[in-house]
Image (cartoon, grey):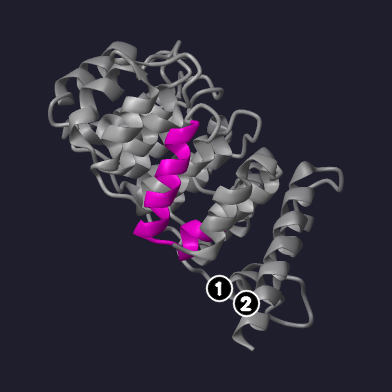
Amino acid sequence: MTPLTALLIDRYDTMTRTRRELLTEAIIRRGGSADAEALLDAFLAAPDDRADLLDVIARHGRVDMAESILAAVLDGDRLRDDAPTEALWAVGRLGYEPAERLLWEHVDSRNGAMEDACLGLFHLSCATIRDDIDAALRRDEGSALFAEFLPLLAVKTGDDDWPRRLVDWGRSASTDCNGGLLAGIAAFGDRERFETVLWDPWWETFGGGTGTDRWAYAGCRLLGLGIPALYDAARSRLEETDGAGRRAVLATFAKVLWHTANGTTVGLTATDSPEESALDLHDAVFEWSTPHRDDSVIGLAGQSLDRDSGTWRVLYEARDRLSWRARVELLGAG
């Protein structure tokens, strides 16, 4: 067990939320099975108040730990009212296949546990509920409002026609709940369709208030689409469009860059942030290739954005975060 884990357990109840988040992030990066075991005991002592410990347990724990987690949060076959919904995600991430039906019962557009249930199921085979998933998708297909993250599970049906249908569905879906459609397309590995909707202003993939930007970032991670490749794609798209289309491309790229710079996590194993060099990312996006013309993303933005556009703030925040991370990298290397 790392000293950080011992510190977290010892002072958990007196720490600020920010400090706990920083410690859990560090333990996720540096910890292992011993940390998961110690934090499981801490979680079980007060499961309703210590949901953030599940992040470490789910990533470093053993599959048998799922039984203890479920025993602490269930009332019969449903989550207790005050129990953390993150428990559903955690048992899925741990690979506990017997929980498939339980998680499926929590996939409901009127249930606050829906997102965590879907994220948990994404890590399981879903062999026992494949037909249920397909039937639910067909029932909601084309609806404006639906269980937002249900489309993430389309890949579990084994039907390779779903990426096309998810794209079509997005034309009628509300942008308040199209994040699951976006991630669902990416889950199939269909980069061409994903990029088509990623840059489409209709999808509002830059939407921060709806959370779609977070799932645009998740989709890029699922596809292994890193910032340099995404930047090339964005520049190509900028040459093909104008006006609102250009502004949408820049806004979407800025949001994905921001999430990358901040190491955003979305709970999917396949999207865990790789160890990317912040210095390389900063150079690829923000440096000029020639002293004679600003051809960085800031220069590109200057050609299309009004000075009061919110995209400027997002870009500058991403630049500052990458600069800070680059300094940390260089100091650590020294």
Amino acid type, mark 2:
Glu
Q: Quadrant of the N terminus?
A: bottom left
Q: Residue furthest right?
A: 307
Against 32, residue 279 (above or below) is: below
Image location (x, y in percent) of residue 254: 65, 51
The region drawn magenta spans 26-46
Q: Residue at x 41, y 18 (%)?
A: 147
Q: Residue at x 72, y 68 (%)?
A: 324
Q: Secondary structure at mark 2?
A: helix
Labelled pair 2, 1 in contact (Cβ < 8 Å): yes
Front residue of 307 and 92:
92
Can residue 263 be seen in this snapshot? no
Q: Residue at x 76, y 71 (%)?
A: 294
Q: Give the labeled residue for mark 1.
A: 277
Amino acid type, mark 1:
Ser
Residue 148 found in image quarter: top left
Tell whether position 34 is magenta: yes
| Mark 1 Cα-neighbour bin, 10 Å: few <14, some 14–19, many ≥20 | few
Tell whether position 133 is magenta: no
Image location (x, y in percent) of residue 266: 48, 43
199 sits to left or right of 168: right
Q: Residue at x 53, y 35 (%)?
A: 50
Image location (x, y in percent) of residue 300: 71, 60
Between marks 2 and 1, how big is the CA–CA gap? 8 Å
Can residue 187 be seen in this snapshot? yes
Q: Give the labeled residue for mark 2.
A: 329
Front residue of 63 and 93:
63
Front residue of 29 and 135:
29
Q: Secondary structure at mark 1?
A: loop
216 sits to left or right of 297: left
